[in-house]
Image: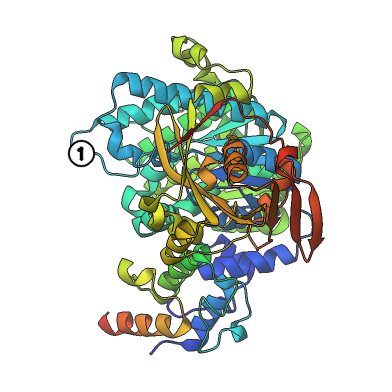
Amino acid sequence: MNTALGPDTARSPRDVLADPAASLAEVMAAVEAAEAERSSPVARIGVSAGATVDLLGLYLRRHALAAGVRVEVSQGNFDDPLGDIDRFAAEGVDCLLLAPFLDTLAPAFEARAAILSDEELNAREAELSARWRLALAKAAGFRTVFLCGLHRLTAPVAGGDRLDAVVERLNRALREEAAAHANVRWIDMAGLVADLGRRAAFDLRFYLRNAAPYSPALLDAWARQVTAVSRAWGTRFHKALVLDCDNTLWGGVLGEDLAGGIRLSPEGYPGNVFHRAQSEFQALRRQGVLLCLCSKNNPADVDAVLATHPDMVLRDADIIAREVSWDDKVAGLRRLAQTLNIGLDSLVFLDDSAFECEAVRAQLPEVTVFQVPASPPAYLDVIAAIKDLFLAGGASADRADKTEQYRQRAAALAEQARFETQEAYLASLGLTVTLARDDARRVARIAELSQKSNQFNLTTVRYSAGDIERLMQDPAAAVYSLEVADKFGSAGLTGVVVVRCEGGTAAVESLFMSCRVLGRGVEFAIWPAIFADAAARGCTRVRAEYRPTAKNAQAADFYDRLGLPLAGEADGVRTYETDIAAVAPPPSPWIKVMHD
Amino acid sequence: MIDEAALKQVMGTVLGVPATAIGPDASQDTLKSWDSLKHMNLVLALEQSFGVQIPDADAADITSYALIKVVLEELKAAA
């Protein structure tokens, strides 16, 4: 533990960024310091998630810096991929990270999944497919889109439960959508959670309060994976793996143990570790990686092992170029790069000798260096990291295995939910808005929403329950509360409008909505009913205003979009006023507005 | 006792202000950047930097420098 070590320790930002045990505060300080030294970002990433993942941005910046580049990260709204994608595109974001969250598909979805009927599950899957088909189509212009798979938050009942099957099915539907787009990369969240362990991956304290389920450790691992899959945001193109021989391809030293003494048998330890390593390297070669040797040995001895050793997996034909001599390895690597006509930064070098690794790191910093660990089992982790470097996010990882399987799936449901436009998609949801005026049963919830709403809150007036009660009793005021429902159920009370009638003018004192329901047209659909009500109470004019805060910039032009003319602007406060009869809100025919 | 300089350093880093801006009366009411999101990050950062586990009951409530100091000292004393 870094007890009482603040971020002002003597370590350089570079050391902190590379240290997996660095504390959150240290990483924050190091990221700020390291970014100050780098001018232009190589990527601008927009994060759109169904959970609060604020710190993911920090860790994405961390791993980019550790790979020698800088990225910028923008956070989207809660569970609003369609709106986020539009906003990100307008902001010049070029890469997207999209992370749907299982438990957000419906309130407490995980708890309810076990009792969903097959029909409900089918409908859920169709809705998910439709939403993400639309999102991925909208995202077609982005350089890279990382689509993160769904995963469970709760532990399975011993022996397994239905949720695993539900998750698997929904993920298959998502991957099917991803397969249609060349710019989409899949991030296996369930795998990340499993790798870290469920208990270490989640922090339920902040899930229930802030919808933030992930521990810093999981967010860090997630960002590391995305950075690897992005190939350091398009700055890394590794092509060749340069292998040492002794204690790398086999156990022991060929010059001393001779061909009969090196350990390489799949049947014994540690030979089985090296046999497995060679099998992994051969698999890499088959996927397009160039394999080279760089070894201090007698060339004829190595040739003989390649040609005749019974346990060798790699053979002469697997090796595209070799530097086997007593010459130094830095010179050998330079010659290999020349021979293959590739840059030194395309080389990955693997050697068991700390001396050789250090020499290459010092003299050829462009080369990516891995050292074979002294303990054979740890070697497998190093190989996994090397595979990640070459294969993560590559065409083979994303396409080869899945395309056929997914295309063959019976498509009845998918067809049914295939929509050409966002309007058709929205129409399929069967959206209803129930508008209630001065509903005393909702006082507590209305006050709570006024305290919590930040982003879509036009004037950010914070009401207590007592304030709301007084407004409801005031004959000159009206508190409208709205409930949004779709074919999957109700989202509960999700928006509030407070209007005061003053001398023939309906003054909109407050408008705030939960971000969960934005992007569906609800914010426009309610106005005809509210204006009609105001007119019935003798109002002929409407007045409204937008007051800026640190968080409500997205609502700045809402009244413009509603069709109200701007009457004045001072200190960022925008005032609108016009005849009620002159306002024509944009139509939203897919929403049915009802009165409670 | 808690290293107050280290505490101010961690709070300053997470809240995006100089450590010198963290006075004894610093709280969610005096520091504009201390919103609910930053508060969550602050709890996580304090746990890592001071090697403690802040119980759920306290996590939401420690919204001032003074309260954080009290809770950290209690946790350290109990450890």
Side (left or right) of A158 relative to A31? left
Residue designated by label 1: A157
The residue that appears at 58% across and 66% down in the rendered structure is A28
What percent of the width, then of the height, locates residue A569? 80, 60
For badge 1, the amino acid type reads: Val
Determine whether A231 is above or below A397 in the image.
below
Image vertical order of residue A108 relative to residue A573, above or below: above
- Residue A311, by quadrant, is top left
Label 1: few (<14), some or many (≥20) within 10 Å?
few
Q: Give me the residue at 49% from left, 25% from top.
A: A429
User: Quadrant of the image for the N terminus of chain A?
Assistant: bottom left
**Which residue is more in the foreground, A316 or A274?**
A274
Q: Is residue B75 rendered to the left or right of residue A478?
A: left
Q: Is residue A315 visible?
A: no
Seen from the viewer's position, the closer of residues A263 and B23 is B23
Q: Is residue A543 left or right of residue A456?
A: right
Quarter the C terminus of chain A occupies: top left
Residue A521 appears in the picture as rendered: yes
Local SS, label 1: loop
Question: Left or right of A199: which side holds A555?
Answer: right
**Residue at the spot x=55%, y=16% of the render?**
A418
Residue A340 image offset from top left, x and y in percent: 75, 32
Identified at 67% across, 57% down, the residue is A503
Q: Position of residue A177 (x, y in %)?
A: 54, 23
Q: Position of residue A465 (x, y in %)?
A: 42, 63
